[in-house]
Image (tube, grey):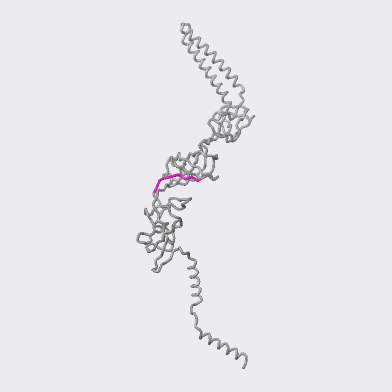
Amino acid sequence: MKLQHLVAIGLTIALAVWMLMPHDRTSPADQYESVHTDAVIRAVPADSVVGNDAGTFTVRTTPVSVQDFVQRVRVRGVTQATRLVDVRAETSGKVIATPVLRGARVKQGDVLCELAVDSRAADLQEASSREEQAKIEYEGALDLQTRGLTSRASIAQLKAALDSSSAAAQRADLALKRTKIVAPFSGIMESRAVEVGDLMDNGGSCGTLLDDTPMLLTGEMSEQDVAKVSPGASVMASLVTGEAVQGKLTYISRAADPATRSYRIEIELASTEFPIRHGLTAEIYIAGTEIQAHLITPSALTLNDGGATGVKLVGSDNVVQFAEVNIVGESTGMNPGFWVTGLPAQADVITLGQEIVFAGQTVETARPASGSN
């Protein structure tokens, strides 16, 4: 028998044996789906939403209660000195002294710049002498008048001469005092505009004086928020340098800026252990009106078919309800979450499983273990 005949007979016998053996009729696609489903089921955490034998889902809920919540209005602003004044000369002359260094703290009345006296001292002495002479002549005329030896016209003339000489002496004294340019208030010498040897004209700048007690925060508040706050409200702010400061709202403008339609505000900061610089950017949080709200975890928020933001609740009959909410604030620290309005005073909020159940569906509930989120 030829080799080809033997191969054909062997294949026929093998095919017959395979056809007589029992086989699993599940298709490869069904086998893949089965394996994939088993893997997904094994990947689902044991404490997640499950369906029981009756086909009812179990969801996790957290009870929330209404609380007092103070709305905070957020404003972006900058630090600002109470006063930032360009101190100028009231007379002219050559600068002979600049005793205060830039950045130094000065008290009211300290000399910032000093000008040469020149002839001002001599002018004062001359004016004082003429005033003394006029005073003696006037007093002598009064004595003569009591004895009837002088006329009233002479007395009036001498009185006018005395007044004129007194005014001249005062002007000379003022001109001499103005050679010393002094600090109008206590503060910091922020900058100096002249050096020894410079010639200053009347009105020339000696330097800039900054008053940092207290420091202010200024900002622009939108017309939607301006009605939520009032002067005297407490304020917390975070400076761009990382420091936290507190203060009190002291001013809200009555007229809006024509370009931005916003209102200027000023906040007086409480004293701090660290210096606050002028012009630092700050995030300002102003205490507004007190309202009733609920604090919920951010993961509880969901959207309905219309795109509205809300949470899903479980009622007393274990039926799911959708409640639209309005986010009015944010909480950080030990209890992070969102403050919302629109919920009943007491509510069971679904915190796990809200995405796979729908309003009107009956579910079973499970509360989280103590200390879990």
230 with respect to 162 (left or right): left
Q: Quadrant of the N terminus?
A: bottom right
In the image, residue 15 above or below residue 316: below
Inspect this view and state whether residue 254 appears. Answer: no
Query: Which residue is at a point 55% across and 15% down the rendered structure image?
Result: 130
- Give residue 241's position: percent from left, percent from top: 55, 45
For the stretch drawn in magenta, the main secondary structure is strand
Based on the picture, tell me whether residue 372 belongs to the magenta stretch. Answer: no
Of 17 and 30, the residue lying toward us: 17
Of 22 and 306, the residue lying toward us: 22
Quadrant in which residue 169 is drawn: top right
Query: Which residue is at a point 52% across and 11% down the rendered structure image?
Result: 137
Based on the picture, tell me whether residue 282 belongs to the magenta stretch. Answer: yes
Query: Which residue is at a point 50% across and 15% down the rendered structure image?
Result: 160
In the image, residue 14 above or below residue 331: below
Magenta stretch in the rendered image? 281-291
Quadrant in which residue 322 is drawn: bottom left
- Give residue 231's position: percent from left, percent from top: 43, 40
Quadrant in which residue 180 is drawn: top right
Of 288 and 318, the residue lying toward us: 318
166 with respect to 356 (left or right): right
Of 259 and 116, the residue lying toward us: 116
**Residue at the bottom extreme of this rendering:** 1
Inspect this view and state whether residue 356 appears. Answer: yes
Count of marks overlaid on the render: 0
- Give residue 140's position: percent from left, percent from top: 51, 9
